[in-house]
Image (cartoon, rainbow, N blue to C red):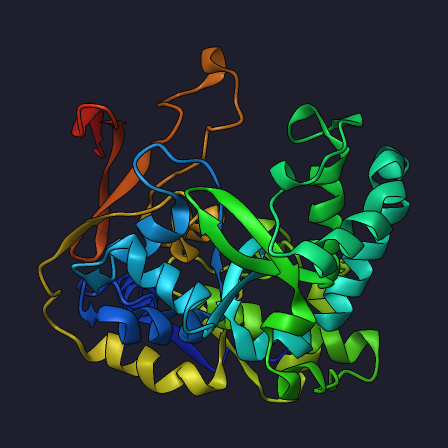
Amino acid sequence: MPPTLPPPELTITRQQARRFLLAHHRLLPPRKLRGKQGVLDYVRHVHCIQNDPINVVGQNPHLVLQSRVKGYKPAILDEALYTDRKLIDGYDKQMSIYPVEDWPYLGIYREDMGDSYARHKSTVKAAKLMKWVKQEVETRGPLSSLDLEDETRMEWWLSGTTRAVRIALDILFISGDIVVHHRVGTRRYFELSTRVLPPKLLKVRPPHTSQEDYLEWHVLRRSGGVGLVHPNVNSKWGGIRGWRGGQVRGALTRLFKKGKLVRVAIEGLPREAFYVRRGDLPALGAAGRGSNTPVGSAFIAPLDNLMWDSNLIEMVFDFFYTWEVYKPASKRTWGYYVLPVLVGDRLVARVDPAFDKKAKLFSIQNWWWEK
């Protein structure tokens, strides 16, 4: 039996929960942030944004930022990543972009993931090439997979039959031996992390003294990435070491007992418990005092931080959303890459967009209003 916890510290309305979440995610109203500093401020505020290569009307990080940063262009993010080196490509909530200063704290995660991938039976061919690939990067870098002259093929769960050198690069990247130096389009060019990251940063050792210590750090950090946290175990905890094993609930309980998280109840949801970081209580109170919702609208990315917990979105916004990219076409309710539509503090519709790159024409293939 889970431990009995004291009653929630405060009870809020659903509208207050919506307004808090949208304000936390800088969407009340959208596009209040400005320029590169706005991009950096947002990523540091939520700790990471999810990166995904699928490009229908823009890749996920660009869709996330265009709804928050006025006049956003992809070049702004590229500059923050590959010129200023203020942000970095890496693994946090799956493939992500996060502040470069967080690099040392994710060391235990990189080590665990890299070792797991390198030792898996499906990556034997890639693992045999890793030493050579790293030497090639050291000698000739920055390199992409096209620069590596080895045609060994292997089966890979994400892409079917593929070149083993590409997977070897990915494992070295996951492990932190190499980092993305720059991109040409969607193609990544890798360089040794020791030649890209500041030496001072590379010397910082993670402060975690145990698995419990690490889990509390990562769960608290991810709580800031979501805003209002429901303890159910789903993909919002993805990328946290041990998240599938029920360890997240234990970390939440310990963080609550230490006073770092506060329990909150939402009117109309008597059987549900929610948490916010103690430092977010002033913003939660401000959301309750607001009388008028600022007018604004935005298309929301499928992997937007706001959408990381679809169960929470359904409870608070009364909006059911599932990303149907990996569903067979015959089993999709809406479409391949459908985006929620935000107006004010409500998700009012969903849109199925398309972009003809040759004609440079954006079109709406379908639109569904909520009831």
In the image, 364: left or right of 305? left
- State the residue in front, 239 or 237: 239
Q: In which quadrant will I find the N terminus?
A: bottom right
Q: Look at 86% across and 52% down and name the residue there.
A: 131
Q: Residue furthest top?
A: 330
Q: Which x, y percent locates residue 97? A: 50, 61
In the image, 337: left or right of 216? left
In the image, 365: left or right of 170? left
Q: In which quadrant will I find the C terminus?
A: top left
Q: Look at 70% across and 40% down and name the residue there.
A: 148
In the image, 201: left or right of 60? right
- State the residue in front, 189 or 323: 189
Q: Which x, y percent locates residue 47? A: 49, 71
- State the residue in front, 267 or 339: 339
Q: Look at 52% across and 16% down and name the residue there.
A: 328
Q: Is residue 1 visible?
A: no
Q: Which x, y percent locates residue 312? A: 45, 53
Q: Which x, y percent locates residue 28? A: 21, 65
Q: Is residue 126 visible?
A: yes
**Above or below 124: residue 31:** below
**Above or below 154: residue 215:** below
Q: Look at 16% across and 59% down and name the residue there.
A: 71
